[in-house]
Image (cartoon, grey):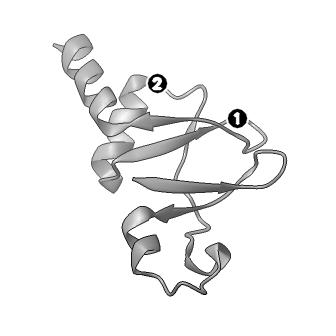
Amino acid sequence: MYLYVTDKDDKLLGVVDLKELLKADDKALLKDIMVQNVITLKKESTLGVASTMFLRYDFRAMPVVDEAERMIGVVNYRDVTKLTHHFLE
């Protein structure tokens, strides 16, 4: 779905949709095709916050970062919708 670009300390620098990567010129640099203002979830985010963010932005997945903006994981849209359906009914 997405390629997340991090520095050597795992700080999230950007995101590239794999479809865009496949369409890009083969000499293009990641820094030129990535989106630098990445919408993220914090490690403290609740299921409700995650669900709201997915509905607002229509992403297939979202990165999870800590307080230093280091990437610690990825949450999938399908996983959130399954949990939301299960826990909010």
Q: Amino acid at mark 2?
A: Thr
For residue 68, above or below residue 82: below
Determine the residue located farthest toward the left in the rendered image: 89
Q: Is residue 10 left or right of residue 55?
A: right
Q: Position of residue 84 (x, y in %)?
A: 26, 22
Return the disc, 1 or 2, that comes first in the chain's sequence.
2
What is the number of the mark on residue 78?
Answer: none
Q: Is residue 32 left or right of residue 69?
A: left
For residue 77, above or below residue 4: above
What is the number of the mark on residue 66?
Answer: 1
Q: How many marks?
A: 2
* Residue at 33%, 48% in the rendered image: 60
Which residue occupies the foreground of this view, 3 or 47? 3
Element type where label 1 sits in the image: loop
In contact (CB < 8 Å): disc 1 and disc 2: no
Element type where label 2 sits in the image: loop
* Residue at 42%, 63% in the rendered image: 18
The C terminus: image quadrant: top left
> What whole-number distance in Å separates the C-alpha atoms at marks 1 and 2?
14 Å
* Residue at 38%, 44% in the rendered image: 53
* Residue at 84%, 45% in the rendered image: 9
**Residue that numbered label 2 is attached to:** 46
Q: Position of residue 73 (x, y in %)?
A: 58, 34
